[in-house]
Amino acid sequence: MKEIKKIAVLTSGGDAPGMNAAIRSVVRTGLKKGYEVYGVKRGYHGLLNGELEQMNTRDVSEILQRGGTMLMTARSKEFMEEAGQQKAKEILEVFGIDALIVIGGDGSFRGALDLSRIGVPVIGIPGTIDNDVSSSDFSIGFDTAVNTALQAIDRIRETASSHERCSVIEVMGRDAGYIAMEVGIGCGAECVLIPEVAFDLEQDVCQTLLTGRNMGKHHFIVVLAEGAGSAVEMAQKIEKITGIETRATVLGYVQRGGSPTAFDRMMASLMGIMAVECISKGKFNRVIVHRDGKIKDIDLEKALAMSKTLYAGSMDAVRQLF
Ligand code: ATP
């Protein structure tokens, strides 16, 4: 086994609260093991530009509690091509990097897998608010995003209730309804609309709202994942069909920022340690996951072949608690 002297870490895809906690953990664990640790700025895009800087323990002071990512993140089309990946490998060789830790979602892990196939040892850490990393029950940032959205909705609920309105609230999730579902159950939404489950506006939404009104409900919340439609259009249609005054709110990037929750800080810190420990044990091309209540490492290729679906009972829970 080649002796490991230098490791590098980057964040890729969308930023997520808790990425900083993971960077801090990787840097400090790496330094304790005697490695030189490099931070790559701006994900794979920065890697192709050679944006690597050596990090010491003080470089990661005071970042644990901050949202975003101190290494910044970017998306790179060039890296998706074979020539880009080859160039990335050469840059890592220029800096003498023996292993690369990638914090991001499944897209970033696909890039990492491509690098591993041309001989770069890699480790993935799941970081995305969407929670759509197929191999891990939770990804860094999801818990914070859900809590941020819930706090915002609790406020909207107070005003919606005073005005006896319906609120359609659009949360993040282009392809996955994890945020919408968790937030919907957490805020007591009448309807949760997600890309994974087809719905009929008249039957599944308007009928539910009118039934609720006839039962004496004064306000209504419809949580919509961005991939399931537009809140503004849906609010207009609901008002037209039901006659209930309806307002749309798009929470947008508010959900991405903010100080990470205790859960995200803890998970990010433990995943960072395990990522470096894998490297020190010569276990490469792994993803650190949170599965069945445990943090463990699994094969990167197998991880990317996995599929994950929403907890089957969650839509029933929304209907049950209506
Ligand atoms: P998020 O869930 O926050 O969007 P992600 O990691 O899935 O995170 P992507 O935008 O899909 O985000 O991927 C980040 C970067 O990873 C891309 O800009 C690209 O450089 C690289 N990447 C994505 N998919 C692939 C792929 N199939 N092959 C090689 N590289 C990829």
Image (tube, rainbow, N blue to C red):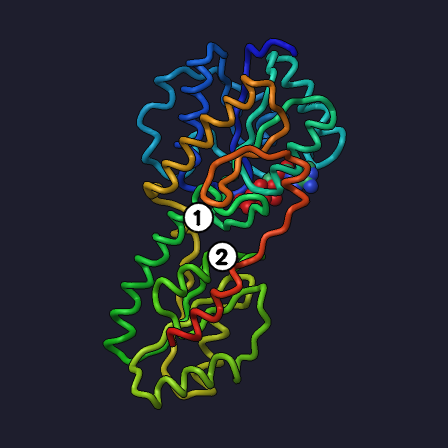
Q: Are marks 2 and 1 in contact (CB under 8 Å)?
A: yes
* Label 2: few (<14), some (14–19) or many (≥20) C-alpha neighbours in 10 Å: many
* Mark 2 or mark 1: whose residue is earlier in sequence: 1
Residue 276: x, y in percent? Answer: 50, 22
Residue at image position (64%, 34%) is: 299
Q: Secondary structure at mark 1?
A: helix
Residue at image position (26%, 71%) is: 159
Residue at image position (56%, 62%) is: 227
Separation of residues labelled 2 and 1 (CA atoms): 9 Å
Ligand 1 rendered quadrant: top right
For the C terminus, which image quadrant? Answer: bottom left
Instruction: Kindly tell me whether residue 76 is visible in this rendering.
Output: no
Q: Is residue 6 left or right of residue 242?
A: right
Q: Secondary structure at mark 2?
A: helix
For mark 2, what is the residue? 178
Residue 1: x, y in percent? Answer: 65, 12
Q: Nearer the viewer, residue 208 or 233?
A: 208
Residue 77: x, y in percent? Answer: 67, 38
Residue at image position (60%, 13%) is: 95
For mark 1, what is the residue? 142
Q: Is residue 138 left or right of residue 160?
A: right
Q: Is residue 83 left or right of residue 35?
A: right
- Kindly identify the amino acid type of the residue bearing the numbered disc 2: Tyr
